[in-house]
Image (tube, helix red, strand yellow):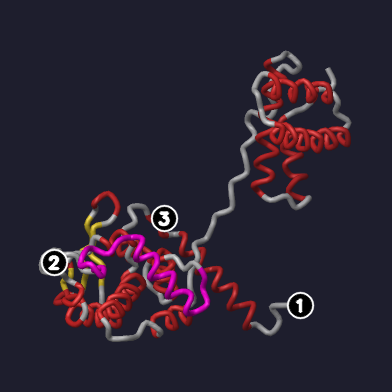
Amino acid sequence: MRIEQAIDEYLSHLRVERGSSPLTIEAYSADLADYLSFLDECGISDPNRVERDTIAAYEADLTERGYAVTSIDRHISVLKGFHRFCMREGYAKDNPAASVRLPAPPEKLPDVLSIEQVNKLLEQATGDKPAQLRDRALLEVLYGCGLRVSECVGLDMGDCVFSEGFLRVVGKGDKERIAPISGFALQALVEYLEHGRAFLAKPAKPTSAVFLNARGGRLSRQSIHAIVAKAGVGIGVENLHPHTLRHSFATHMLAGGADLRVIQEILGHSDISTTQIYTHVNRSHIQEEYLSAHPRARL
């Protein structure tokens, strides 16, 4: 059987037996038509003549034509299904696409703020009202200590060991660690605890939580997200996420010369490979600095 006939049979199988939607059939048909054109150029018309190297060459061709990794992944997935169908129906003796690995998705680097942006973000957090003192302390702790939102929510008064310069943090999996706190973060948190928290607390609803809402209860995750997003708008950053401050903390620590193992310990990562993502972020900043500063880095 010729390849084009096998493709027609496969699309019919998807439509009738698998009940695939018209949009799915249309997408598969387009991908297989592109594959058929490639095989025509290779002089291949019989499914039995397709080898693993043929599929690999097609994958390389897609890359050369500028297809995104996600698009290549979809094309190869379609081919795996098609050649599996050909083997099952007896149109080919084996599946040449079975051992072809799908391309690895590109590693998504976390969003980070520049040091200048962080400074603007924190410098604009002013005011001496209880909620303003709380918000400034929250932003300083998120960036200054690299805490997760859930860790800020769960922070209790007994976790603040200022005499020794650390916060006791309960992270993922209820794992406890210490996070150093000093400088602006310590100053802002102490100021909030001394002059802001007491005005937010309600005697009828005692709580050990550090960060309180207007009703005297523990500040929620949603509220922290809203506080950070609002602060981001003030410096022209839409939809600023609290985790971006944690990413920025780690990136700036690494850029400042901190050891990766120390950053891992502070962030509470169980695996060093999780922390290593920040080495890539740091390299991207190096590249940006190089391109902007070197007189012959750009044409």
Per the image, label 1 sits on a secondary structure element best described as: loop
Residue picked out by circle 3: 274
**Disc on the earlier residue, 3 or 1:** 3
**Disc on the earlier residue, 3 or 2:** 2
Q: Residue 198's image quarter?
A: bottom left
- Picture coordinates of residue 208, whole percent (x, y): 15, 64
Residue picked out by circle 1: 299
Residue type pointed to by label 2? Gly
Q: What's the CA distance linking mark 3 and mark 1?
A: 36 Å
Q: What's the CA distance linking mark 3 and mark 2?
A: 29 Å
Residue 158's tag is 2
Quadrant assignment for the C terminus: bottom right
User: Where does the magenta region start and end?
Assistant: 212-238
Q: Residue 53's image quarter?
A: top right
Per the image, label 3 sits on a secondary structure element best described as: helix
Residue type pointed to by label 3? Thr
Per the image, label 2 sits on a secondary structure element best described as: helix
Residue 40's tag is none
